Image: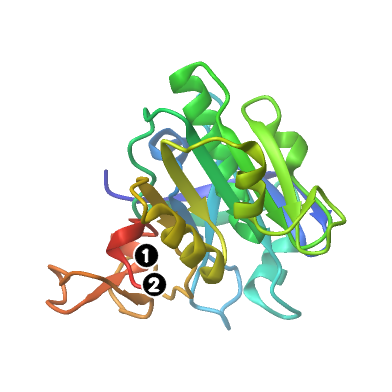
Amino acid sequence: MKPIMEKGRILSQKEIAKDIFDLVLTVPGISQMAIPGQFVNVYLGDPSRMLPRPISIAGADAEKGELRLIYRVTGKKTGTEWISRQEAGTELDILGPLGNGYQDLDGDTPVLLGGGIGIPPMLYLAKVIYEKQGKKPHVILGYRDLAFMTEDFLPFAEVTETSDTGETGIKGTVLDGLASLGIKPGVLYACGPKPMLAAIKRYAAAGIPAYISLEERMACGVGACLGCVTETAGVDAHSQVKNARVCKDGPVFPAESVVL
């Protein structure tokens, strides 16, 4: 389905951790089309900032017509800082859903790995897999220090926490968390910083299907500006070189198809 531009009305917004905001808004059309792994462009009501801000989808409720976005404010006087100051009742222009989402959601022993601000899209994915399969998938959450979303996952997933500092869960990486479970994943889904994704790609090279969501700076969000290309293992049909547009061809890719 083609993305649509929709006027979204903010229902609630709150800071759930330092610089991490939880935004819920009504967008009936987009909420019906969204799948895990996709994102939306949030346009700013500020003429000095023409470019929208891409934010991954943390949840979509088609019946209520609601979308949940969890994002990080990247600094003072930024677009995300402007979004964080908007209150309930404010209307925002939203374009979406954008990009390609996660595939093969019926696989046995799925394991989801989220790191940092790559954790929010894992929530929507965990919920959909749980609803499809009728059992909770394993989810490994990688925090820098303190947790900010774990409780949201508990109805849909078996959760293991890790952190860089050891303040939350196991001290180490999401792969350390996976090792602690003593299971062999049937399929991996991941979103997080590039070093984490590179490590997951190496782990999956032993023969485990893996789908990873890349985090890149996006400008247009629809594949027109070529500002978010990533190197690929094969030649891209659009550019005829070993590149792909993260916003249009991704953000979710089979791990073996991209160079990290």
Looking at the image, which residue sits at the far right?
167
- The x, y position of residue 73, in whole percent, is 71, 68
Mark 2 and mark 1: Cα distance apart in space: 8 Å
**Residue drawn at 52 percent across, 55 percent down:** 191
- The x, y position of residue 183, in whole percent, is 55, 35
Q: How crowded is mark 2: few (under 14 residues within 10 Å), some or many (20 or more)?
A: some
What is the number of the mark on residue 75?
none
For marks 2 and 1 on the same chain, the one whose residue lies earlier in the sequence: 2
Q: How crowded is mark 1: few (under 14 residues within 10 Å), some or many (20 or more)?
A: many
**Residue drawn at 50 percent across, 64 percent down:** 199
Looking at the image, how many numbered discs can be counted on the residues?
Answer: 2
- 5 above or below 46? above
Q: Which residue is denoted by mark 1 in the rendering?
A: 247
Q: Which residue is denoted by mark 2 in the rendering?
A: 220
Mark 1 and mark 2 in contact (Cβ < 8 Å)? yes
Looking at the image, which residue sits at the far bottom?
48
- The x, y position of residue 100, in whole percent, is 34, 51
Residue 78 occupies quadrant: bottom right
**Residue drawn at 63 percent across, 73 percent down:** 79
Horizontal side of 38 relative to 173 (left or right) equals left
Residue nearest the observer in this picture, 215 or 40: 215
- The x, y position of residue 47, in whole percent, is 56, 79
Q: Which amino acid does label 1 sit on?
A: Cys
Res. 200 in view = yes
Residue nearest the observer in this picture, 22 or 117: 117
Residue 99 occupies quadrant: bottom left
Q: What residue type is labelled 2?
A: Cys
Horizontal side of 107 relative to 153 (left or right) equals left
